[in-house]
C-alpha cells in the first residue's frame, strides 16, 4: 500500500482533468442543468450532446431505445437511434458560458456535427470557442439518421472527408480539436491517422456500434418497433467494451497518442483497462443512462484504492502498458503451454459440464468418474473452454511450460 497520496489528475493532449471520468456526448449532457448535477457529484468533464447548425431540422422517433439482457435479466447491451441535440446553438452558447463561470475547474467539451460545408463547420466551431468551450469534439461517428444526410459516420468512414473537415476546424479555432471515431469501419487506424495528419489534437473512441437489437418473434417486427418498422441503431454499454478496447489499443500507439476511451465503462476496473490500452481519460454514457450520475462515486473510490494498493501515484504510469503487449497472432509464443487443472476437487458438483463441452467442442480430454471429473493431461490442448463453463470455477489454466 502506497504511503503517498494518489493523484487522480490526468492530462489528455493539453487538457487537464481532475480525474479521468468524463460524461460522453449523449442524453445525460443534453441539458445544462444535467451537467451541473454531474459536476457537483464529481465528474471531471462533460462533452455536451452533439450540436448541429440551427437551419438543419431533426425530429426524434419513439421509442428509440432497445436492450439486450443476459439470461438473468440484466442489461448487457443498449441500442439507440436517437438523433443529436434538440437545443439550438443559442441555448448552448449561453449555457457553455454560464457553466464555465460556475465550474472553471471542470472541462467542458462541445460536440459538433454539420453537413460537409466549410462554413457550417467553421461557424459552429467558432461559436463554441467564443462561448468558452475548452475543446471541440467532432462527431464523425453517429451511425444512424445523420449518415443518410452525409453526416456522422458517413464522414468518419471516409479518411479524405475526415481529414478535410478536421483541417477546416483546425483553421477556424485555437482550442483543442478531438475527433470522435466510429468503430463501424474496416480499419479504424486509417481514419485515426487521417484525422491526426490533418491536425487533430486528440481522438475519442468509440461511438456506438451499428446494430439491430432484436426481433419480436410473434409479430416479426424488428426492434425497437416504431409503428411496425425499425432501423439500424447504435449499440453501447458493457457488451461493446471489447470493441472499444480493441479500437483504443489500435489507435493509441501504446499511449503516445492522446485518446479518450469510450464504450461499456461502468466500473473503475473498466477505466483502468482503457487506460492500460492507451486512453488518457474515459467517457461514460450508457452506465449513467441506466443508473444515474452517482455511479461516479464508487468509481472514484475504487480507482483511488486500486492506485494505493498498486503504489501508482499517477495514472500516466500505467497508460498504454497493455497496448504495448498486443502483437500479431503469429508473434504469440508457442513455447508457453497451458493445461487445465482441477484446483478444488472437493467443490465439484459433478455437473459434468466441463466433460460435455470438452467431448463436444474440445479435445475429449475430460471424463466423468463417480465422484467428479478427471482431466487426461495427454489429450488436453489448453484451449480453456472447460474453465470457462465450470460453474464453480474449480478448473484453472496452469502454465506448465514456457
Ligand atoms: C441514447 C444515446 C445518444 C447518444 N448521442 C450521442 C451524440 O449526440 N453524440 C455523440 O458523439 N455520441 C452519442 N452517443 C454515443 C456515446 O457518446 C458513446 O460514444 C457510446 O454510447 C459508447 O459509450 P457507452 O458504452 O458508455 O454508452 C449516444 C449514445 C446513446 C446511448
Image (cartoon, rainbow, N blue to C red):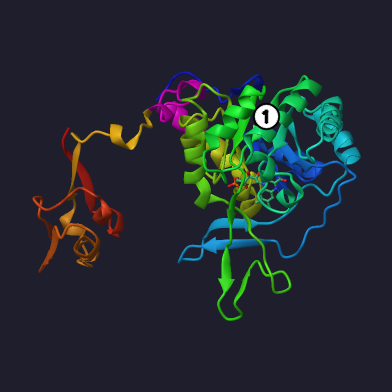
Q: Position of residue 359 (x, y in %)?
A: 19, 64
Figure quadrant of the C terminus: top left
Q: Is residue 385 above or below residue 134?
A: below
Residue sitting at x 70%, y 26%: 177
Residue bearing the label numbered 1: 163
Q: Position of residue 125 (x, y in %)?
A: 81, 30
Residue at the limit of the structure toward the bottom, as seen here: 218
Left or right, 144 with reference to 320: right
Count of marks placed on residues: 1
Mark 1, residues whose alpha carbon is within 10 Å: few (<14), some, or many (≥20)? many
Mark 1 secondary-structure assignment: helix
Report if residue 14 is visible in the image: yes
Task: Report which quarter residue 323 is drawn in.
Answer: top left
Q: Position of residue 15 (x, y in %)?
A: 66, 22
Report if residue 106 is visible in the image: no
Task: Report which quarter residue 175 is drawn in.
Answer: top right
For the residue pair 267 and 398, the one nearer the viewer reads as: 398
Residue sitting at x 66%, y 35%: 42
Q: Position of residue 247 (x, y in %)?
A: 51, 38
Q: Which residues are magenta?
A: 303-324
Whether residue 118 is in magenta: the answer is no
Amino acid at each position: 500500500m502506497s504511503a503517498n497520496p494518489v493523484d487522480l489528475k490526468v492530462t489528455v493532449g493539453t487538457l487537464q482533468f481532475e480525474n479521468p471520468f468524463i460524461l460522453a456526448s449523449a442524453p445525460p449532457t443534453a441539458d445544462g442543468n444535467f451537467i451541473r448535477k454531474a459536476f457537483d457529484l464529481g465528474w471531471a468533464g462533460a462533452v455536451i450532446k452533439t450540436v448541429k447548425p440551427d437551419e438543419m431540422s431533426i425530429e426524434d422517433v419513439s421509442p428509440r431505445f432497445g436492450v439486450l439482457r443476459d439470461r438473468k435479466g440484466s442489461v448487457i447491451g443498449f441500442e439507440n437511434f436517437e438523433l443529436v441535440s434538440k437545443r439550438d446553438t443559442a441555448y448552448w452558447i449561453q449555457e457553455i458560458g454560464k457553466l464555465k463561470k460556475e465550474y472553471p475547474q471542470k472541462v467542458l467539451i462541445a460536440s459538433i456535427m454539420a453537413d460537409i460545408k466549410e462554413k457550417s463547420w467553421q461557424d459552429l466551431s467558432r461559436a463554441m470557442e467564443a462561448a468558452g468551450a475548452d475543446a471541440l469534439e467532432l462527431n464523425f461517428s453517429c451511425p444512424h439518421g445523420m449518415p443518410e444526410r452525409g453526416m456522422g459516420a458517413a464522414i468518419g468512414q471516409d479518411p479524405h472527408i475526415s481529414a478535410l473537415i478536421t483541417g477546416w476546424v483546425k483553421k477556424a479555432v485555437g482550442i483543442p480539436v478531438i475527433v470522435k471515431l466510429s468503430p463501424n469501419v474496416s480499419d479504424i487506424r486509417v481514419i485515426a491517422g487521417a484525422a491526426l495528419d490533418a491536425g487533430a489534437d486528440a481522438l475519442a473512441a468509440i461511438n456506438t456500434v451499428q446494430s439491430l437489437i432484436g426481433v419480436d418473434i410473434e409479430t416479426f417486427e424488428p426492434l425497437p418497433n416504431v409503428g411496425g418498422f425499425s432501423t439500424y441503431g447504435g449499440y453501447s454499454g458493457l457488451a461493446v467494451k471489447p470493441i472499444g478496447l480493441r479500437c483504443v489499443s489500435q489507435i493509441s500507439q501504446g499511449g503516445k497518442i492522446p485518446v479518450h476511451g469510450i464504450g461499456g465503462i461502468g466500473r473503475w476496473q473498466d477505466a483502468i483497462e482503457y487506460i492500460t490500452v492507451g486512453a488518457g481519460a474515459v467517457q461514460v454514457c450508457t452506465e449513467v443512462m441506466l443508473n444515474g450520475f452517482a455511479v461516479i462515486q464508487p468509481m472514484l473510490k475504487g480507482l483511488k484504492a486500486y492506485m494505493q494498493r498498486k503504489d501508482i501515484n499517477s495514472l500516466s504510469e500505467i497508460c498504454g502498458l497493455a497496448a504495448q503487449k498486443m502483437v500479431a497472432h503469429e508473434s504469440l509464443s508457442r513455447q508457453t503451454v497451458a493445461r487445465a487443472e482441477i484446483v478444488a476437487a472437493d467443490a465439484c458438483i459433478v455437473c459434468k459440464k466441463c466433460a460435455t463441452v470438452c467431448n463436444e467442442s474440445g479435445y475429449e480430454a475430460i471424463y466423468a468418474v463417480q465422484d467428479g471429473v478427471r482431466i487426461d493431461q495427454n489429450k488436453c490442448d489448453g484451449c480453456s473452454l472447460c474453465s470457462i463453463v465450470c460453474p464453480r470455477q474449480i478448473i484453472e489454466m496452469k502454465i506448465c511450460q514456457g
